[in-house]
Image (tube, helix red, strand yellow):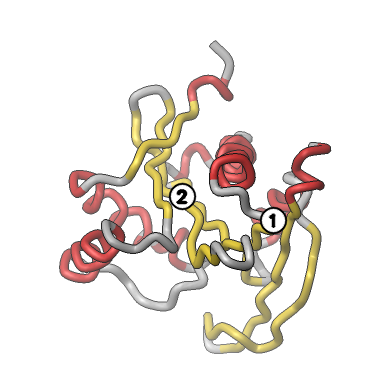
């Protein structure tokens, strides 16, 4: 069984919330995340409750075989304009740099373009997160814009890189 066939996405359940908190609040993951607050049980439970009614978010747990290793999804889905943002966290840090992120992105793109019939999917990455920038480039995303001084980390301002892929580019991929 190859690595690609081991990766699956399943709908987030209430049982996954503590893992998501642990992953998102991890020092190494939080530093690279564009959200600026740490999670707690109340915030995460409120998020989950809203997620059940919110059609602008499709969130999944990433499974490697039967092991939960991360969370991902399409957020800010705009059905009228056929756009969304992609979000991905590989929570098991030992698995970083092993090609899993590229597989997960491919699965999300397939879901977004084929099932949701989107036209464009966007990623926003902090400029110092070169690993994610490279990952999205390998997944055929192109740089659209640099938003200057958008996020405060380590006592200074950082730019956000906005990257995207269109359905027609995914079809060639």
Q: Quadrant of residue 157?
A: bottom right
95 lies left or right of 144: left
29 lies left or right of 17: right
Counting from the top left corner in percent of width and height, residue 84 is at 58, 62
- Which residue has dot 1 on it? 119
Say which mark, if any, is on residue 72. Answer: 2
Counting from the top left corner in percent of width and height, residue 102 is at 64, 40
Counting from the top left corner in percent of width and height, residue 133 is at 71, 58
Residue at the image point whose x is 77% and y is 39% from the top: 171
Where disc 2 sits, the SS reads: strand
Q: Quadrant of residue 45?
A: bottom left
Where disc 1 sits, the SS reads: loop
Q: Residues within 10 Å of mark 2 (few under 14, many from 20)?
A: many
Q: Quadrant of residue 50?
A: bottom left
Residue at the image point whose x is 72% and y is 60% from the top: 164
Figure check: 10 above or below 123: above
Q: Quadrant of the N terminus?
A: top right
Q: Quadrant of the C terminus?
A: top right
Q: Residues within 10 Å of mark 1 (few under 14, many from 20)?
A: some
Figure check: 161 above or below 23: below
- Farthest front residue? 80
């Amino acid at each position: 069984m190859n690595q690609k066939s081991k990766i699956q996405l399943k709908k987030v359940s209430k049982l996954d919330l503590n893992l998501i908190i642990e992953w998102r609040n991890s020092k190494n993951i939080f530093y690279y995340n564009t959200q600026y607050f740490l999670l707690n049980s109340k915030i995460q439970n409120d998020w989950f409750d809203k997620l059940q009614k919110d059609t602008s978010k499709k969130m999944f747990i990433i499974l490697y075989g039967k092991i939960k290793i991360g969370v991902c999804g399409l957020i800010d889905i705009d059905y009228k304009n056929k756009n969304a943002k992609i979000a991905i966290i590989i929570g098991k840090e030992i698995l970083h740099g092993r090609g899993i992120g590229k597989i997960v992105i491919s699965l999300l793109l397939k879901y977004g373009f084929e099932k949701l019939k989107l036209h464009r999917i966007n990623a926003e990455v902090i400029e110092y997160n070169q690993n994610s920038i490279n990952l999205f480039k390998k997944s055929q995303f192109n740089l659209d814009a640099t938003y200057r001084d958008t996020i405060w980390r380590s006592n200074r301002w950082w730019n956000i890189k906005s990257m995207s892929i269109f359905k027609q580019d995914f079809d060639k991929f």
